[in-house]
Amino acid sequence: MDEFKPFDDKLAGLLAALSPAGRRRLTVDIAKKLRQRQQQRIKSQKAPDGTAYTPRKRQPLRAKKGRIKREMFAKLRTNRYMKASGNDSAAVVEFTGKVQRIARVHQYGLREKQSPYKHIIKYESRVLLGYASDEKKMIIDELSHLLSLL
């Protein structure tokens, strides 16, 4: 860890030398790229560590006819519900509005009642938002690109 201390000090000095607007622009760019990567990963139905999501529970054989289910989390991963924001100190990717509850239930594998008259359902844990090594590499690449411009 001590071998990175000079690098961290230099990087902190360079980031401090940036104007607040420059830092905000950098964090917003990083947040947008992180959101895009998270959306692609959710679309491919994979957790941040690369493992596949637990598949949906099989529906009864005599279920409704003609109903075609979407893939899991098709609407959750849209820009309308998955927001990316940044300020001069942080880049944030989060779910907004009422879908936060749905995302939290699936992220942590909680129990939930679908309606007041139905029984409680235990959902499998499916990590929607996470931080993988390729995201770390992307952030380092963004910072190095910024430093090359200075």
Image (tube, grey):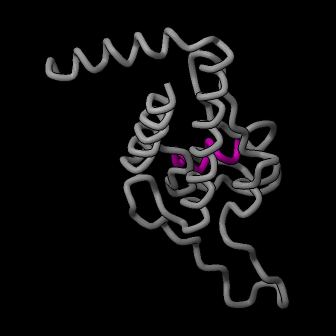
Q: Where's residue 34, x and y in %?
A: 57, 44
In front here: 63 or 31?
A: 31
Residue under the image location 49 percent in, 38 percent down: 142
Numbered marks: total: 0
Name the dominant secondary structure of the magenta segment: helix
Q: Up-down: is 6 above or below 70? A: above
In front here: 5 or 102?
A: 5
Residue under the image location 40 percent in, 50 percent down: 134
Image quarter of the N terminus: top left
Q: Where's residue 124, x and y in %?
A: 51, 57
Q: Left or right: where does residue 48 sit relative to residue 6?
A: right
Magenta span includes 103: yes
In front here: 116 or 128?
A: 128
Q: Up-down: is 30 above or below 126? A: above
Q: Which residues are magenta?
A: 101-109
Q: Where's residue 25, x and y in %?
A: 66, 27
In front here: 37 or 76?
A: 37
Q: Where's residue 104, x and y in %?
A: 62, 41
Residue under the image location 80 percent in, 40 percent down: 98
Q: Up-down: is 102 above or below 17? A: below
Q: Up-down: is 109 above or below 58? A: above
Quadrant in the picture for residue 2: top left
Residue under the image location 66 percent in, 66 percent down: 72
